[in-house]
Structure formats: C-alpha cells, structure tokens
Amino acid sequence: MKSYFSSGKLLFFTYFIANIFFGSLLLKLPISWIGSEPLRYIDSLFTSVSAVCVTGLATVGTNEFSRFGQVIILIMIQAGGLGIITFSTIYLALPGSRVSLKNSKIIKEYFIMDSNITPKDIVRAIITVTIVAEILGTFFLCIAFVGEGVKNPLFSSLFHSVSAFCNAGFSLFPDSMESFKQNWIVNGTVSSLIIIGGLGFMVISDIIQKIKGKRKRLRFHSKLMLIASASLILLGALVYGSLEWNGAFGSLESKDKILPILFQSITTRTAGFNSIPQSDLSSASKFFTLLLMIIGGGSGSTAGGIKVSTAFILFIILFKGVDDSGEMRLFNRRLTSDNLTRAALFFVKAVFIVFLSIFLLTYYESGKGFSQLDIIFECFSALGTVGLSTGLTSSLSITGKLVIIGTMFAGRVGLFALIMPMNLSSKDRFIDYPKGEVLIG
C-alpha cells in the first residue's frame, strides 16, 4: 500500500477523476445545454469522460451544448490531452523543485531526454509546442471555415484545432468532417495537427533541435516513430483505397477519392474525426480499422492506444524473434529484454481490457439489434481513445454506457498507470526461487 501512494498513482488518478467529476457537473448545469430534451447525468458523465480521455465518442451531439458547455468541453480536452504528459513530470518534481537521481532516471525513461534536464524545462517545451501548433491550426482552419460560410468561424477553428492536436475527435458539426471532405485546407490542417500531436513531444523536440543544428542525428526513438508512423499512414491509405474504392468512396470521382482516403488512414489510429460514415465501410475495412485503433499514436503524445513503438517492436519480434539473451538488434541499436518484456506485457493487458469490455457490452446489449462487429468496433474505439463509431454509441443502455466509460478511462488512464513505477527502490536478490521449466508453444 505504501508503494502505491509513494508511486504517485493516487495523485495521478485523482487528477483525472476530479476533472471528469467537476466537468460532468458543469455540463449538467442548465447554462451548458440547449438541446430539445433535458440532459441526463449519464450523458453528461459520458461526455466528460470522453473529453478528458480525449476519445470523442458521444451519446449526444456537441452542437447541442451551449457555447458555455462547448468551452467546458474544450477545457477538458486540453486538460486531458496534456494531463498524462505534464503529470508525469510535475509529480516527479514534488515536493520540492530539486530533482533526485531516481527521478532523473524516470524522466529519462519517459522522455529519453538528457539527464540534466528539469521537469520545468520539459513542461515549458510541451506548452510551447502546444500553443504554437494550436494557434497555427486555428489560423488556417479559420481561413477555410470563413470560405465555407461556417458560423462563428473563430471559435469553431479554435475548438477543432485543440480537438485535432489532442487527438480527441470532438467536432461542433453533427457530421464531423464529412462536409469538408474535399476541402484541402481543412483536411490538411486537421491531418497535420493529428500527426504532430500523435508523434509525441520528444519526437517533435528532437526534430526541432535537428533542424536548428543542435543535434547531429535523431534519437533512435524518433527514427522509429517517424518510420513506423509513415508506414502506417501509407499502409492504411493503400488498404482503404483498395477495399473501398468502389465501396464507401464509390460515389466520389476518382480524383476526389484521394483526400478522404488519406484522411481516413490518418484519423483512424486515434483522432476520431471522420469524413465518411464509418457504417459505410465494409466488414473487411472495419476489421482493419480495429488494428489501427488499438495501435494508436506515439508514446508521450496526446494519442491513445498501445502506442506505435510498442506495436512496431511486437511486429519485429513476430517476424525476427529475439536472440539467446532475450534481446533484439534493430537499426544498429540493441533493444534489451526489459524493453521487449514491457512491450509484450503492455499489449497483453490492453488485449485483456478490450476483450473484457467486448464481453460485458455483448452481454448487456444483446437482443437490441447491434451486430457483433459493431460492438467490437465500439470497444476498440473506446480503448484506443479513437472516437470512431458505426452509430452504436447513442443507442446504448445506461449499463452499456458505463461499460464504454470504464473502457475509455482504462484506455487513457489505466494503461499509462500500469507502466508507472510502483516502487523506485530496488533490492539485490541473494536468495531466489529455483528455476521453473515450462513448455511454450
């Protein structure tokens, strides 16, 4: 119990639970809602969890909230998107401003930064990147929205810029980005914000330092993230293009299909915006979407999922395997058995959570006309904090909504808490148990 409290997990969970609880109360206020029917607390709570966990799943339309309610949602998205990143540095600096040797090791583990960097430097860099990216995104989106005749273009631009950068997927438009699927400025800006927010702040900082000439080469993690992210975007575009060329994108002219196909590939892994209805996708495309959703974005980013680096390592292990010492060589670097074990455990725990969610949702929502694939799709989207849906969310029962609430929270907060160190102290083992032999495979 002492290690639980000293690890910072209690403070970590308190941060998110407090944001969710107070956010749900603020959204329940009459000043926050302009819908035709009164807002139930379960829907207020669902919206709050979805915003803080930057998921984007919604039981009610964001456009049914008043401007005050939309501002509350915007604040929760920002707090949730940056919460994990900033929290993991802020709590390391407590109770004083000095950083101990143990805490420096944790910072290096989470951010792969130089050991002499302080948590304040990391937080300052995160805030700077966030502000610059969201302001630029607001600027370009405002130009596009003014041209499209959108009401209140400045606020709409700010809202979608923050939502895109935090990979939240919340939109003020009832059809998300479907009305703008041929607008290159909107698609390009939103896609860029999704990619930047999903790469991770360490990768962005690494690239900036490389451009400024402060670094001769990118770190190993940055190279891995850039290669894997580009590969996933290209793979997604090829798969969706081949499967849906005459399907979900069949109504479009050939030259008009490229942009929505590329946008579908980018947004699927964690952002949750959609330029085509996900219910129009074929079963094969939906199954492929499950893979992208559970992968998610980069470590130390605003994105969810098991993370690109974890998936990439597991993919290499699958085909290349490990050597006799339990390690692996990749890009002239050595990945230790500790890295490989943590990646495998992280994936197994995520799979356990999503299958538990599928089981519970199938049990409580059986007999309501939902297909099994739609239920699976909803659970994967919630765990990966993606926010894409085939239209199931608003029709869920109260129990079903609670299952998705728990899955969103586990996907955003629970998975990260699993890798937070329980006890920083290590003890040498002079006496250990005998070696056990187990047949594998």
Image (tube, grey):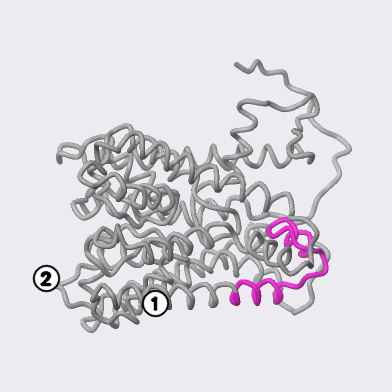
Left or right? Give the position of 439 relative to 106: left
Identified at 44% across, 51% down, the residue is 266
276 or 289: nearer the viewer: 276
Q: Residue furthest left?
A: 36
Residue at the spot 61% in from the left edge and 37% down from the top edge: 344
Q: Earlier in the sequence, mark 2 or mark 1?
A: 2
**Quarter occupied by residue 92:** bottom right
Which stretch is magenta?
103-128
The residue singled out by tag 1 in the image is: 158
Residue 153, located in which quarter of the rendered image? bottom left
- Compared with 271, 69 (above or below) is below
Magenta run includes residue 57: no
- For label 2, the SS is loop
Q: Nearer the viewer, residue 387 or 267?
A: 267
Q: In the rendered structure, which amino acid carries the disc numbered 2?
A: Glu
Whole-percent x and y of residue 132? 55, 76
Mark 2 near mark 1, Cβ–Cβ under 8 Å?
A: no
Q: Nearer the viewer, residue 307 or 416?
A: 307
- Residue closest to the far right: 430
Does residue 305 appear left or right of residue 317 in this picture?
A: left
Q: Report, in whole angstroms, how far the alpha carbon at label 2 lies from the one at label 1.
A: 28 Å
Q: Amino acid at mark 1?
A: Leu
The quadrant of the image that shows the N terminus is bottom right
Of 116 and 19, nearer the camera is 116
Q: Main secondary structure of the magenta part?
A: helix
Q: Secondary structure at mark 1?
A: helix
Find disc 2 in the rendering and name its residue: 37
Q: Is residue 424 above or below residue 140?
A: above
- Please identify the quadrant where the C terminus is shown: top right
**Residue 430's x, y, as percent?**
89, 38
